[in-house]
């Protein structure tokens, strides 16, 4: 799996996801002669849940979706593709700073979870190609 080139993913949560993928797939660093290319498009949504009597949200659901495609570079054959989701929740509190920190932690957790799911799919795709 160390022969996978992971394309750059836009925005902060994409960077987090890519960094975890790099750690999992290429722990010794990226190769100069990759055999496979992995591209991912990230979409994130937040849904407020658990409202108070004053109609203020107390909990938010954070959902991170990643559409991935693993391609063998030599013949551009798509070995595996799909969309995976990671979901986590976080509390919304009186302090805006604390709520932002909770959302940031939820984003990082979801990025790690999504990256692990994608790494598993890459392993399946590469194993199936051999």
Image (cartoon, rainbow, N blue to C red):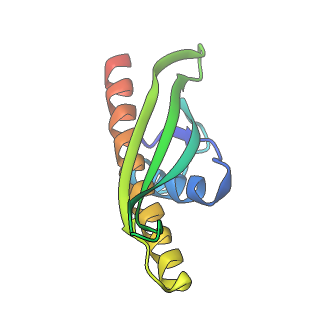
Residue 50 located left or right of residue 44: left
Residue 130 visible, this angle: no
74, 98: nearer the viewer: 98
Question: At 50% across and 70% down in the image, what residue appears?
Answer: 104
Image height check: is 53 above or below 86?
A: below
Q: Residue at x 37, y 50 (%)?
A: 87
Q: Quadrant of the N terminus?
A: top left
Residue 71 coordinates in the image, percent (x, y): 54, 23
Q: Position of residue 18 (x, y in %)?
A: 53, 52
Q: Nearer the viewer, residue 99 or 31?
A: 99
Q: Quadrant of the C terminus?
A: top left
Nearer to us in this view, 67 or 61: 61
Judged left or right of residue 24, residue 37 is right
- The vertical placement of 72 against 22, above or below, is above
- Return the x and y of residue 11 as percentages of the image width and height: 67, 55
Q: Quadrant of residue 122?
A: top left
Q: Does the image show residue 89?
A: yes
Q: Residue furthest front?
A: 53
Number of numbered markers: 0
Q: Is residue 108 left or right of residue 113?
A: right
Give the x, y percent position of residue 8.
65, 47
């Amino acid at each position: 799996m160390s022969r996978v080139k992971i394309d750059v993913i836009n925005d902060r949560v994409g960077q987090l996801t890519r960094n975890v993928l790099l750690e999992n797939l290429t722990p010794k660093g990226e190769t100069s002669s990759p055999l496979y290319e992995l591209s991912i498009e990230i979409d994130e949504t937040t849904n407020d849940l658990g409202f108070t009597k004053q109609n203020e949200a107390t909990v938010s659901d954070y959902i991170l979706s990643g559409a991935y495609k693993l391609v063998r570079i030599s013949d551009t054959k798509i070995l595996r593709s799909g969309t995976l989701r990671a979901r986590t929740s976080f509390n919304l509190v009186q302090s805006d700073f604390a709520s932002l920190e909770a959302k940031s932690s939820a984003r990082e957790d979801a990025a790690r979870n999504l990256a692990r799911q994608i790494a598993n799919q890459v392993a399946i795709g590469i194993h199936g190609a051999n």
